[in-house]
Structures are given as C-alpha cells and as structure tokens.
Amino acid sequence: MPVTATENAICRVWGMSLPTRSRSDTPQTQAEIGEAYAVFAAACPNHSHLIPLNTDKG
C-alpha cells in the first residue's frame, strides 16, 4: 500500500525521536524501549531503518 506524504512525515519525525539504548538501562527501561521499537516497526514498516541500533553506550 502506498504511503502518503503525511504518513511519511509522521513516521520520519517519530523515528528520529525514538529512544536509544544504554548499558546502564534498567531491565524495565530495556523492555519499554523494545516495546517502543516494536510499535514503531508495526506502524511504520517502511521506516524501520530509523530504529536506533544497539550502540551500548555506557
């Protein structure tokens, strides 16, 4: 299904605002970030490249 310009803009801005992970994250924070990534991936499948990689920042 084609993506509208509005959907594209929303997904782009949302994707750029996703939280990043850190080694100091608590298990709860890790779970919440994972859930945020999953919701984003389901809602914006054409923008999954915006999901931050696990950078292991300490």
Image (cartoon, rainbow, N blue to C red):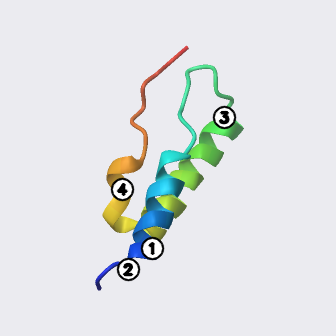
Q: Which one is in front in this view, the residue at disc 2 or the one at disc 3? A: 2
Amino acid identity at mark 2: Thr
Cα gap from disc 4 to disc 2, whole angstroms: 17 Å
Give the mark count. Answer: 4
* Foreground label between 3 and 1: 1
Pointer 3 residue: 27
Amino acid type, mark 3: Pro
Pointer 2: what residue? 4
Tag 2 near tag 1, CB within 8 Å: yes
Disc 2 secondary structure class: loop
Residue pointed to by mark 1:
7
Left or right side of 58 for 54:
left
Cα separation, mark 3 vs mark 4, equals: 23 Å
The residue sitting at 58% across, 54% down in the picture is 35
Q: Earlier in the sequence, mark 3 or mark 1?
A: 1
Task: Looking at the image, tell me whether mark 4 or mark 1 is earlier in sequence order.
Answer: 1
Element assignment for label 4: helix
Q: Amino acid at mark 1?
A: Glu
Dot 2 alpha-carbon crowd within 10 angstroms: few under 14, some 14 to 19, many 20 or more: few
The residue lying toward the viewer, choosing from 6 and 22, is 6
Q: Work out how far the residue at label 2 is from the one at label 3, CA to CA, in angstroms.
A: 37 Å
Dot 4 corresponds to which residue? Answer: 48
